């Protein structure tokens, strides 16, 4: 009878430890997923198209002038030189 009680106690302790480890893993996984999702949102910012060469690039890397987007200063200057004066 004593052996049965010892086995039940050991089983209960192992079950409790496994449950604790599973909960810790699940919390860690959720925090990793949230961090990954946040990083993707930062990486996947709004894309704009260069008015000169038509290449798409992130908005935070583009130059804007008169409501148009450009990938570089050179493209902005060349585009503005080609436009007839208003």
Image: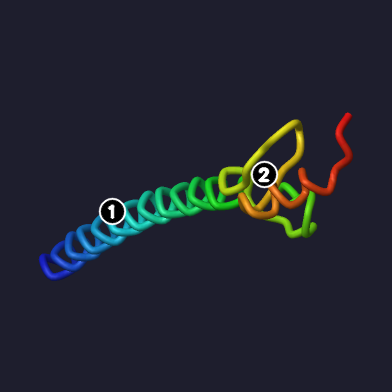
Up-down relation of residue 65 to residue 12 (above or below): above
Q: Are marks 2 and 1 in contact (CB under 8 Å)?
A: no
Outermost residue on the left side: it is: 2
Which residue corresponds to the image point at 10% horizontal and 65% vertical from the top-left?
Answer: 2
Q: Position of residue 47 (x, y in %)?
A: 69, 48
**Which quadrant holds residue 13?**
bottom left
Q: Quadrant of the N terminus?
A: bottom left
- What's the distance in space between the residues labelled 2 and 1, CA to CA? 41 Å
State the image quarter where residue 32 is shown: bottom left
Name the secondary structure under disc 2: loop
Q: Is residue 59 above or below residue 15?
A: above
- State the residue position of label 1: 20
- Left or right: 65 in relation to 60: right
Q: Residues within 10 Å of mark 2 (few under 14, many from 20)?
A: few
Q: Secondary structure at mark 1?
A: helix
Nearer to the camera, 38 or 72: 72
- Mark 1: few, some, or many residues within 10 Å (few <14, many ≥20)? few
Frontmost of labels 2 and 1 is 2
Q: Is residue 29 above or below residue 45?
A: below
63 or 57: which is nearer to us?
63
Q: Position of residue 64 (x, y in %)?
A: 67, 38
Residue 51 point in image, percent of width and height: 79, 49
Circle 2 sits on which residue? 46
């Amino acid at each position: 009878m004593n052996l049965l009680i010892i086995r039940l106690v050991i089983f209960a302790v192992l079950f409790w430890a496994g449950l604790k480890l599973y909960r810790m893993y699940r919390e860690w996984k959720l925090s990793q997923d949230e961090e990954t999702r946040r990083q993707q949102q930062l990486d996947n910012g709004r894309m704009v198209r260069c008015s000169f060469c038509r290449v798409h690039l992130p908005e935070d890397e583009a130059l804007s002038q008169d409501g148009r987007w450009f990938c570089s200063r050179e493209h902005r200057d060349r585009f503005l030189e080609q436009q007839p004066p208003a």
